[in-house]
Image: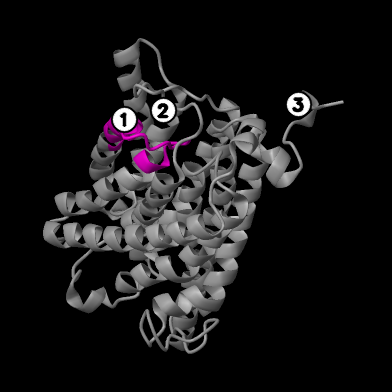
Amino acid sequence: MENINDVKYILDSFLMIIMAAFVMWMAAGFAMLEAGLTRTKNNTIVLLKNVALYSISVIVFYFVGYNLMYGEGGAFIGSGFALSGISYDDHSLYADFFFQVVFVATAASVISGTVAERIKLVPFLIFVAVLSAVIYPIQGHWTWGGSELGGLIAGFSDFAGSTIVHSVGGWAALAGAMLLGARSGKYGKHGQVRAIHGSSMPLATLGTFILWVGWFGFNGGSQLAMGSKEDVDAIALVVASTNMAAAVGALTMVVITYLKNGRVDLTMVLNGALGGLVAVTAGPDNGMIAATIEGAVAAVLVYIAVPMFDKLKLDDPVGALSVHLVNGIWGTLAVAIFNSEVSMIAQIKGIIVIGLFTFIASYVVWYILKITMGIRVSDEVEYDGLDQHEAGIEAYPEFSKNFR
């Protein structure tokens, strides 16, 4: 019996480690997607932000965030430090930490794309540190940490984080975008929307495929166990459903943009796939049919949400709000639609509580940063490109006007 338990411990821990490596690879996907959908003059800063935010998330979540999220003392006091006081009998603590920390970095990556091309580097990284150390872990303690906020959100179900990860990143990004303002020239005096095209569709497409593959670890690993035939079957269903939602989201957007415009918009197709992935994340264990419907609806929502945010003059260079915030909400609601054991009321309460907390806390942090050190670059820096002034290294110097 002891050997059987050892094998299960090994298999469950291995699942977390290998799937976390898949999710970590999503950091490259976010970097490539953001670089492709923004302008060349800002690409170095985009890449720098994505490397730095991942590193910051790992460090502060280890020292502070993980204990806030899973410590015995609760999410506010007495939770310990650097994994102290936490242990598991059925899997490795360090495997669990590694799997959880890559989710934190994912939430931070969502923000990076929304505030791209006009955010100062240092205040952005400070915000990431606060998000990873405090904001994300507190709401995580209410959900995956098991506290249920004193029963307020009892019954809330989010398998791999449509709300807990993706919408949290979306709410934090929304707060930042509201205080930051739009890129210069994005909106005209009379409300007209001017397209600011990205620098590389190949990079954006590569980023999307990397994210697509990484999502198999994101959702598949959230089964958290593969010590039995039933666990492996469950992982396989989750991975297959995740793949289906992305494929349906992409193809639905192909059809929508062709019927609407007479041509297919690649950027919208990429976000259609990503929207499907976000939507299915809350309930990938509900089956392939549910994933098919979730992916189709996700694409429709992205198509509606992108111009909606533009009408509100909320500039989002990569469409992260439409993909992660809107479809994080949709995916969480969809769990109750496709699983009769989950209460829609519980899902709605969870969305509202987590959304309000994340948005208000994020707004306060962004506002403090704005009035103390400023969060937006000057008009001159924005015009020249952040690479010149914030990094001193241009992504493609041989093509630069300053090349000698």
Q: Is residue 150 above or below residue 169?
A: below
- Secondary structure of the residue carrying tag 2 is helix
Which residue shows up at 34% across the image and 19% down it? 257
Dividing the picture into quadrants, the one containing residue 168 is bottom left
Q: Is residue 105 above or below residue 194?
A: below
> Residues under labels 2 and 3: Cα distance?
30 Å
Neighbourhood count class around disc 1 (C-alpha, 10 Å): few under 14, some 14–19, many 20 upward: some
Q: Based on the picture, tell me whether residue 166 belongs to the magenta stretch.
A: no
Residue 230 left/right relative to 396: left
Which residue shows up at 52% across the image and 82% down it? 83
The answer to whether residue 105 shows anywhere in this view is no
- Would you say the magenta stretch is mainly helix, strand or loop? helix
Neighbourhood count class around disc 2 (C-alpha, 10 Å): few under 14, some 14–19, many 20 upward: many
Which residue shows up at 46% across the image and 85% down it? 86
Who comes first in sequence, dot 2 or dot 3?
A: 2
Q: Foreground residue, 400 or 61?
A: 400
- Secondary structure of the residue carrying tag 1 is helix
Residue 381 location in percent, x, y?
A: 64, 38
Q: Amino acid at mark 1?
A: Lys
Q: Foreground residue, 344 or 131?
A: 131
Who comes first in sequence, dot 3 or dot 1?
A: 1
- Name the residue that disc number 1 marks: 311
Q: Based on the picture, tell me whether residue 311 belongs to the magenta stretch.
A: yes
Residue 168 left/right relative to 201: left
> Residues under labels 3 and 1: Cα distance?
33 Å
Per the rendered image, the range of residues in magenta is 298-322
Q: Is residue 291 above or below residue 11?
A: above
In the drawing, what numbered circle is on residue 269? 2
- Name the residue that disc number 3 marks: 400
Who comes first in sequence, dot 2 or dot 1?
A: 2
